[in-house]
Image (cartoon, rainbow, N blue to C red):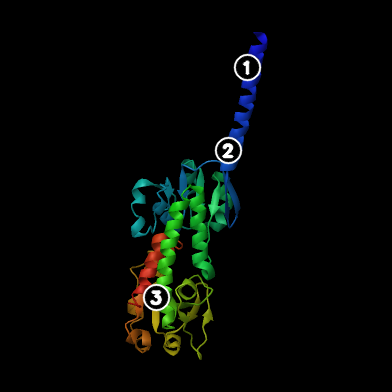
Amino acid sequence: MKKTINSVRQLLSGLVIVLASSLMMTAQAETVTIEHVKGTAQFDEVPQRVVVLGFGSLDVLDKIGVAPVGAPHSLMPDYLESYKKTTANTGSLSEPDFEAIYMLKPDVIIAENRMLKVYDKLAQIAPTIMFSIEGDKYWADAQQNWRALGQLFDKQAEVEAIIAETQDSIAAVNDKVTSGETTAMMLMNNGNNIAMFNKGSRFSIIFDDFGYVESKSATVAPIKGTHGNLISFEYIADAKPEVLYVLDREKAIGKSEGRAQQLFDNPLVAATPAAQQGNIVYLDSSAWYLAGGGVTAIHRMLGDIERTIQ
């Protein structure tokens, strides 16, 4: 009898060891490592309390059904405004409210370019993922960021479906643009200053992914500036673009209602092929300037492009 009991005990002990080992292996297998611009972050389970500090990432979370507990409320795009009611305010896009973030006890903080300087402070509060969108690989970076969020929240299938749909939309626009070898300029006015953005800039998606040919002046030189290369209306007239895309920075940052249309209503612009063909587009400032890399943002950007290629 004793031998039988001992045998049962040994069998049970063995089963416990096997079960514990199996659970450990499962836990290890489920550890998710997220690569980002500041390194890597590891998670043993899907984060529940999420603080997101950029509108592009908030846009993606919205599409895959992840509800954050905190987000910046200032300058929030209209298509995300419902989150003002459901999240705590975490400050602005460039100045986070560290105390508010700390009080939310986040499992993860998702940040973007504008927060690079404060990454270390954020990482002291909770594991922090830092996403970036580089102008010369905008769409590639966006896909990488979306996939990272899909991996983190176990939403890979949803993300892949969104990427496929967006890729199809980009390809359709690119086919229409490249078939005509259309020349374009991407401009931003900051007050009365006009800046031009070329290939390799933050708005390089216009040329790299949407397919436009850069329109440049052969005789007037631009001046390198903080926000693009500063140019004059004489430069625009000499470049003779077939399409003009204009982003009003003051409107984007809530400084004014914008004055781009008034500023570009002049004889030099009126003489361009873009003006004569009705191809001056004043861009969705939130999508282009504030929510870079977001799902809705990219589709709104595509909508702006499609206004000139119908």
Q: Secondary structure at mark 1?
A: helix
Cα distance in 3D space between marks 1 and 3: 79 Å
**Which residue is most to the bottom?**
219
The mark closer to the camera, 1 or 2, is: 1
- Which residue position holds label 1? 8
- The residue at 35%/76% (across/down) is 281
Q: Nearer the viewer, residue 160 or 60?
A: 160
The mark closer to the camera, 1 or 3, is: 1
- Which residue position holds label 2? 26
Q: In the rendered image, which quarter is residue 81 located in?
A: bottom left
- Which residue position holds label 3? 246
Residue 143: % across, % down: 49, 61
Mark 1, other Cα within 10 Å: few <14 / some 14–19 / many ≥20? few
Q: Secondary structure at mark 3?
A: strand
Cα distance in 3D space between marks 1 and 2: 27 Å
Mark 3, other Cα within 10 Å: few <14 / some 14–19 / many ≥20? many
| Up-down relation of residue 120 to residue 16 (above or below) | below
At label 3, the amino acid type is Val
Q: Considering only order in the chain, which callout, 2 or 3, is on the residue closer to the N terminus?
A: 2
Q: Are marks 3 and 2 in contact (CB under 8 Å)?
A: no
